[in-house]
Image (cartoon, coloured by chain):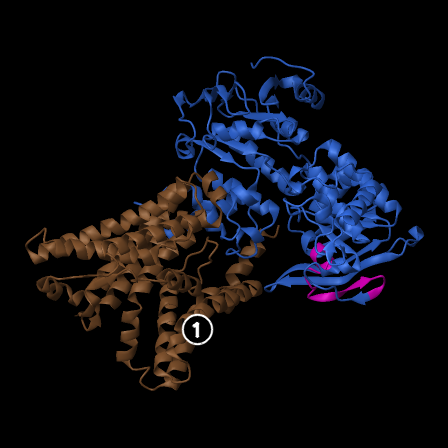
Chain colours: A blue, B brown
Amino acid sequence: MNPDVADGAPVVLAARRVSKSFNGVQVLFSVNFELRAGEIHALMGENGAGKSTLVKILSGFEQPTSGEILLDGQPTKLPPNGQAEALGIVIIHQEFNLAEHLTVSESLFLGREVTRFGVLDRKFMRAETRRVLDQLGSHVDENALISSLSIADKQMVEIAKAISRDARIIFMDEPTAVLSREETNYLFRQVRKLRERGTSFVFVSHKLDEVMELTDRVTVLRDGQWVKTAPTSILDGESIAQLMVGRELSSLYPAKQEPSVDEDVMLSVAGLSTQYVQDASFDVRKGEILGFSGLIGSGRTELMEAVAGLRSRTAGEVSVRGTPVPAGDVHAANRVGIAYMTKDRKHKGLLLNSGMTANLTLQSLDRHGEHGYLSPKSEAAALERARRRFDIRVRDGRVVAGRMSGGNQQKLLLAKVMETEPDVIIIDEPTRGIDVGTKQQIYHFISALARDGKSIIVVSSEMPEIIGLCTRVAVMREGRIVGILEGEEISEQEIMRYSAGLKKKTAA
Amino acid sequence: MTASEDAAETSARGRTWRDIDLRAVAPFAALALLLIVGALVNPNFIGLNNLANVATRSAFIAIIAVGATFVISSGDLDLSVGSMVAFVASIMILFMNSGAIADPSLMLAAAVALTIIIGAGCGLANGLITTVGRIEPFIATLGTMGIYRGLTTWLSQGGAITLREPELQTLYRPAYFGTILGVPVPIVVILAVTIVAAFVLYRTRYGRHVVAVGSNSDVARYSGIPVNRVRTIAFVIQGVCVAIAVLLYVPRLGSTSATTGILWELQAITAVVVGGTALKGGAGRVWGTICGAFILELVGNIMLLSNFISEYLIGAIQGAIIIIAMLVQRSLVRKS
């Protein structure tokens, strides 16, 4: 690597020729990385490229198999299990490490409470918390319970916690994955403020536009190898994507296939209500991809869970090919051919401690044997088929799902849902937290399924995804479908107008 | 890109020592170690007679623990099994004493059927209270533990319930003391129960559902698995296993009292955990459980045969074993 000396800022943390193997499988190959004081450094790569492993090594959670870590230029062995915090190195995880029932100031001082005469000095700790939050420009109440905070504010508390512990180096793993645009802007303002004061950030994200907006330099990894480190200013989204994938991303989205108008209606939902969703009606034809857009909390997931029988409904009819589907019965919905693919693959989709086979066939065990008796041979064949069909790449076929990369997990989840041979497939956030290469693959899988005559509903918060894939788009707002857009109407501005409540029309 | 390479790598490497799951092997290694220690302590220990004796005496806990493996794998816990043994055994003996059926063979058959039904019923009650009543299994079965024990005390009026019919006694005695092809009946029953249980847990849809529910009930629900039914059935299986243990227990002493089966729930849970089943659910090891039950009984046996530890310390040692087993399990998880 050739450090850009002109920048002048000293290197605070560096990895030099770092390699790492797990159980004999090498995941990092002699990687170099350096982080300067007061820079925001993006770490990019496809799922499985080795980003998480590198972050863990740089923060002491894993030790390198070979190579060395330099802290302020000195070779260092970082202490394990987060003790590197004492050296000013902090990771802010995707899933927060906050105890929900503590207050903000209790969280900030957790584990290093200040006492006076052996009694907690609450007053001092509250004042100190206020000071740190003010410094960040955050309005979070220091006495509020963590459980009452929005996700963005929780993130802010994590950052405040890092600062109050004199963090100089902060790793952020996909910090914006669960944030709205507004919250993201807020977060970025705080991050920039800290950069001015010399704090360094390593920013792991799949969102190219955010990387372009926020970061100073970018390092790209591919298949465990270092590919490039460059100032963000000389790159653009396209070139980063190419570096990550190592090939031209000719078309992220496959060509749209409009189903003919007289194609049969496969799924019909009429007047469906739940506790939150009101009077939702829509149809999906054979071979159609219908998008569901809307802000977070607009009721899309709740509606889809009600359609799939995972949630009870207070009114309305769901029918497949004209046959009504009983309410609140997942199994019945499965049987008539409705399958729902959750957006929460780690908590609702996959058994993280089980292998691929157990996950793949969980929803469709009756296909693998008679009278409840399972045939391992038939299951193994199903796995082989799924691995080929959905290009699930793993080094060891017996790996547990929790150790697979996000992209492979998502493919496995899609394969699992498809094992039930559904006619109507509801895909909630098809590409959350996965890299651009796998995204492209998933889009092509979805398109191929539609060509095969499946009816598909895509629920997504990523506008380009909805626009790129769907031939019709329903927009939801506060529990209602406020518009169904077709053809030329499908544009970012138009969808925004509906989801913000500026425009409205009755369901087509 | 790398897909074909990866596949090639996997097949070329084949099965190596690394593929062996240490957690599955650990209980059997511990069992082997105990056998060696026992042989060193007392040469009589390793004799076939002594070992068959130990296995026979472990039958009650082993069979109950097989049921507990299902409950624990599905993420629940049943504290009531010890009381349930006392309760089910009391009903069985009271029924046989009632003289409702004259013919001894018919009477015995009816008593066996009744016992299984009562056991299943007790399990069903535990299951429904936990799932339909949505009460933590720990609390729910703590409650039924008190109920079953209290009912037993009431049925026995604080004393013992003894099988009176000598004819029935003679007829029933071989169920514990007899042999089949030279193998004591209890050992045969352990084997039969374990084989069936292993088949159900590893090779049937229901077994897969149990593990899925215990591993993550949300994932199970989203996969269309009837979570509450799976959990309830696990409790019923536990009840049936308790009933089978009772069927062996009654001919042994021909009597029960309010103190029958005290702390058996602790031993059953210990056997399950020592056997490598995760207490938080999501993985069940039936053969490991049997191994765990043997280990508990062997430790007691070694203490009896040796002179350096008082046998009155058995309870303390068994308590220590569960803690050590947990520590060993966790260290093995870290390594893998």
Disc 1 packing (10 Å; few <14; some 14–19; many ≥20): some
Q: Is residue B56 left or right of residue B146?
A: left
User: Who's the residue at 70% across and 39% down the image?
Assistant: A144
| Residue at mark 1: chain | B
Q: Position of residue A81 (x, y in %)?
A: 67, 60
SS at circle 1: helix
Instruction: Say which quadrant the C terminus of chain B sits in.
Output: bottom right
Residue in the picture at 42% in, 84% down = B308
> Is residue A368 in sight in this rendering?
no
Report if residue A419 is visible in the image: yes
Which of the pair A394/B238 is nearer the observer?
Answer: B238
Residue B137 appears at what percent x and percent y? Answer: 42, 49
Give coordinates of residue B278: x percent, y percent: 47, 58
Q: Which residue is mark 1?
A: B30
Which stretch did the figure color magenta?
A55-74
Which residue is painted at 24% across and 50% down in the image? B118
Task: Name the kind of residue labelled 1 in the image.
Answer: Ala
Whether residue A63 appears in magenta in the rendering, the answer is yes
User: Which of A260/A423 is in front?
Assistant: A423
